[in-house]
Image (cartoon, grey):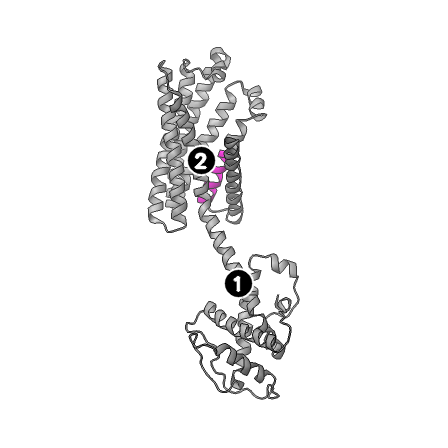
């Protein structure tokens, strides 16, 4: 039960990582490093899927008993090759050096693939490939098959581990965290492949291997694969979480600004930045819709305050640490908006509810405090608070 849960967790993590990379690649199809990561995960998916029924049975019916093992290992070698290419393209971004080095690595991959195909054909001739079914390491061709695959994997994973650690030391969080997790996974996979190489040599010479060693090798790679997938996905997931947090903050501030915006918008409807009606569902579902409506509301509130500021006598530049400034300003603002002199020629605008630092977020925070005071004033006056958010969507 536990092993089944772990397996399904690995599958879900892998599908999520692959789906995320495909999504990123669709948005940036010319990114060579991203393409290498996507092909790496896609190769891993093919190696995992084609080694199981009914695909393995179909492949065996066409190519013989050793064909499923050959196809699986070819995709595994392709996986680690594209993993190396990711670092090659990343280190030489925008230059031809990464492509040249990737071609040299492709030559080694081709040699390893030729070795696997040759060993498979030789093992198939001997005993019609029955050695693959029995994992009979007395057959030299079968021993060559496993050694070629394991040696290439150890080489490729060791190179990828070295580059991953180098990138992790030079990166900042969250990228560094993801790289260190990926490095742990790659290191575990390299260790498992090294153990398998040694075990293959021992068994081919007639030696016996304690079951605990074989079990340890399986456990190490079972831990390494999900660690690698988590590491690859971690920076993107962390970024999306941060984006969601910002969206929630902007949505909350947008609603807090509602009472102030409604009052100023009724007095100065010409300050609305976008007065053409839009499709509500589309604007709310678009990722940037929340930010656009939030920024627009902040600007409209500030424009309205600039317009009414000459009527807010006495003029006072209030600091954030002065208690009660928002309630006092809300009272004077409501009184000024009820005045009959709104349509007179405007006087010189003055600073009203200005933040201590000139940033949009601080400005929004200052306006939100004033809007909260307007809402409290309406509640005291017995008016029902409302927020016409749809009018600025």
Q: In front: 31, or 297?
A: 297
Badge 1 density bin: few <14, some 14–19, many ≥20, Cα 10 Å = many
Where residue 212 sits, quadrant-wise, is top left
- In three-dimensional space, the C-alpha distance between marks 1 and 2, rounded to whole angstroms, equals 38 Å
Q: Hey, which quadrant is residue 61 in on the image?
A: top right
Mark 2 Cα-neighbour bin, 10 Å: few <14, some 14–19, many ≥20: many
Farthest residue to the top: give it: 127
| In the foreground, 379 or 335 | 379
Mark 2 lies on residue:
225
Residue occupying the point 55% across, 77% down: 304
**Residue lying at 51% horizontally and 81% vertically, measured from the top left:** 328
Task: Give yes or no for residue 158 being in the magenta stretch.
Answer: no
Q: Earlier in the sequence, mark 1 or mark 2?
A: 2
Numbered circle sitting on residue 214 = none
Overall secondary structure of the magenta section = helix
Q: Position of residue 388 (x, y in %)?
A: 63, 69
Image location (x, y in percent) of residue 197 = 37, 24
Q: Is residue 72 left or right of residue 203?
A: right
Q: Which mark is residue 250?
A: 1
Tell me, yes or no, if residue 69 can be seen here. Answer: yes
Question: In the picture shown, does residue 72 fall above or below 171?
Answer: above
Using the rendered view, name the quadrant where residue 371 is placed: bottom right
Please report the bounds of the magenta region as a residue range. 32-44
Q: Position of residue 167 (x, y in %)?
A: 35, 45
Q: Is residue 285 left or right of residue 104?
A: right
Q: Is residue 34 magenta?
A: yes
- 3 above or below 32? above
Q: Position of residue 309 (x, y in %)?
A: 52, 82
User: Which type of secondary structure does the marked residue at label 2 adopt?
Assistant: helix
Is residue 144 depicted above or below 152 in this figure?
above
Residue displayed at 46% across by 69% down: 362
In the displayed structure image, the side of residue 75 where residue 100 appears, left or right: left
């Amino acid at each position: 039960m536990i092993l089944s849960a772990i397996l399904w967790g690995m599958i879900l993590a892998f599908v999520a990582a692959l789906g995320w990379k495909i999504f990123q690649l669709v948005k940036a199809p010319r990114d060579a490093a991203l393409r290498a990561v996507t092909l790496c995960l896609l190769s891993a998916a093919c190696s995992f899927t084609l080694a199981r029924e009914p695909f393995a049975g179909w492949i065996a019916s066409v190519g013989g008993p050793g064909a499923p093992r050959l196809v699986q290992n070819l995709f595994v070698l392709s996986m680690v090759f594209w993993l190396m290419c990711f670092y090659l393209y990343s280190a030489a971004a925008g230059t031809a050096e990464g492509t040249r080095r990737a071609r040299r690595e492709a030559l080694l991959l081709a040699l390893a693939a030729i070795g696997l195909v040759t060993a498979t054909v030789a093992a198939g001739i001997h005993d019609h490939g029955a050695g693959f079914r029995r994992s009979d390491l007395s057959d030299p061709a079968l021993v060559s098959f496993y050694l070629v695959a394991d040696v290439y994997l150890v080489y490729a994973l060791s190179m990828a581990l070295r580059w991953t650690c180098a990138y992790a030391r030079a990166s900042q969080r969250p990228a560094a965290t993801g790289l260190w997790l990926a490095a742990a996974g790659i290191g575990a996979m390299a260790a498992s492949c090294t153990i398998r190489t040694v075990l293959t040599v021992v068994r081919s010479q007639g030696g016996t291997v304690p079951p605990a060693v074989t079990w340890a090798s399986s456990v190490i790679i079972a831990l390494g694969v999900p660690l690698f997938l988590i590491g690859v996905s971690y920076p993107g997931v962390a970024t999306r979480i941060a984006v969601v947090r910002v969206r929630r903050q902007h949505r909350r501030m947008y609603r807090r600004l509602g009472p102030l915006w409604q009052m100023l918008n009724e007095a100065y409807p010409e300050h609305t930045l976008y007065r053409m009606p839009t499709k509500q569902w589309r604007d709310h579902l678009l990722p940037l819709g929340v930010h656009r409506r939030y920024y627009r509301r902040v600007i409209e509130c500030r424009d309205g305050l600039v317009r009414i500021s000459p009527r807010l006598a006495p003029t006072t530049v209030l600091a954030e640490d002065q208690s009660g400034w928002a309630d006092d300003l809300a009272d004077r603002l409501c009184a000024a908006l009820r005045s009959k002199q709104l349509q007179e020629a405007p006087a010189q605008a003055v600073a009203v509810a200005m933040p201590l630092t000139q940033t949009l977020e601080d400005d929004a925070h200052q306006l939100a405090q004033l809007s909260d005071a307007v809402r409290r004033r309406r509640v005291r006056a017995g008016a029902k608070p409302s927020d016409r958010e749809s009018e600025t969507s």
